Image (cartoon, grey):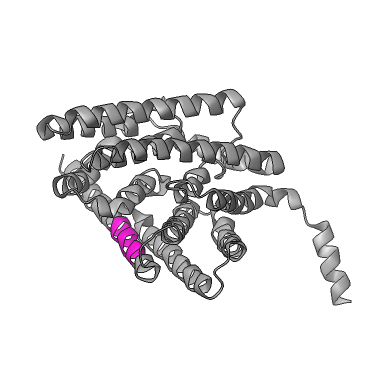
Amino acid sequence: MLGNTLIDKVSKYDWEISIPVVRYVVGISFILLVSSLMGYPLAYLTTVLALGYIAPGAKPLTLKQGFNFILVLILINLITFAFSSFFKDYPLVFMPLLCLGVLWIYYTNKLPQMVKLFAIVSIFLIPLMSLEPTGVSAFVAISLVLNAFMAISLTQLVFKIFPWSSADEIFVKTKEQAANISEYERFKYARNILFILLPVLLLFFIFKLSGGLLILIFIGILSMSPALANVKVGKFMIIANILGGLFAIIGYQLLVFVPMLPFMILITLLIGFVFGSKLFSDSKLAPIFGTGFSTFLLILGSVTSSDDEAGSAVWSRLIQIAVAVIYVVIAFGILHYYQNKKSKIA
């Protein structure tokens, strides 16, 4: 009798409402499988970049849009590479121009959000790697374009398997409302982000801390999260990202016992549904679960693709990302506090 009741509930369930989260989780697991099998440079970034193309409210791209995205990304990398090669020996010119570029990227609304994310990652990594031996920055630039191409191509294939549905519309409306802000608010947000990023950029470029690339990558990803604008959810963001890191450690420990790619995909599916079910909800804290899942993918991917001692690397990656999240949340909170204090005095 209980079995018949369960079957009846399952048969009456409207499965269409689950399409967005299933697309998100199954899609990213499929992309992880493909990128892992191909094993190209920085392949772990493909899944992280792909998240934005199948996130809540993200519509499938047309062929023209995808082609234009790739052209814009190539152009951004070429400009960044040329800028780094020419100005790296003139730090007093290099850093102000770099900061100006960062400010413009966060301020402009001419670029799609995913192109902005890619541009930020490029403008952080390529100039820093240009300080290394010749050829490293060019290799990074080409690898980033390849990862972006794979992310766009594979996510659009995922949309063919799990087509756009009416269940996605609610997330589109939420996304459009979040994007509808004035020019002053955009400039204020861009200025605040630059204030937060400047100490990190100076630290990395002065001391050439190329070993901490993961911190820069994650700060770039984190800075694009809409939840960052709300200081009150900062502590939840820290918890969600550390939770994502802890899941990555658990996943790695399980992979030590069963070192098989299919098992890693199953782990990703399981963790994906944990975060995805929260991300695709009407909760005000929903966006932080997206960054939490990106933490999981970034740590697990970077560790499994690393030639270093993986056991120590996985904890190192978690510490690096925890430092990045805590720094950004605290810095944004302090900045918000002093701005509010100044406005009350005025």
In the rendered view, would you say 129 is above or below 79? below
Q: Image point 61% across, 34% down: which residue?
A: 60
Query: What's the magenta bit mostly, secondary-structure-wise?
Result: helix
Q: Image point 60% across, 26% down: which residue?
A: 63
Q: Image point 22% across, 33% down: which residue?
A: 98
The answer to whether residue 299 is seen in the rendering is yes
Q: Image point 24% across, 38% down: which residue?
A: 134
Looking at the picture, tell me which residue is in the foreground, 87 or 65.
Answer: 87
Image position, residue 346 (x, y; %): 16, 39
Image position, residue 55 (x, y; %): 54, 45
Image position, residue 143 (x, y; %): 41, 40
Left or right of 150? Residue 337 is left
Residue 186 highlighted magenta (yes or no): no
Looking at the picture, tell me which residue is in the foreground, 282 or 74.
Answer: 74
Left or right of 324? Residue 258 is right
Magenta range is: 316-326
Residue 324 highlighted magenta (yes or no): yes
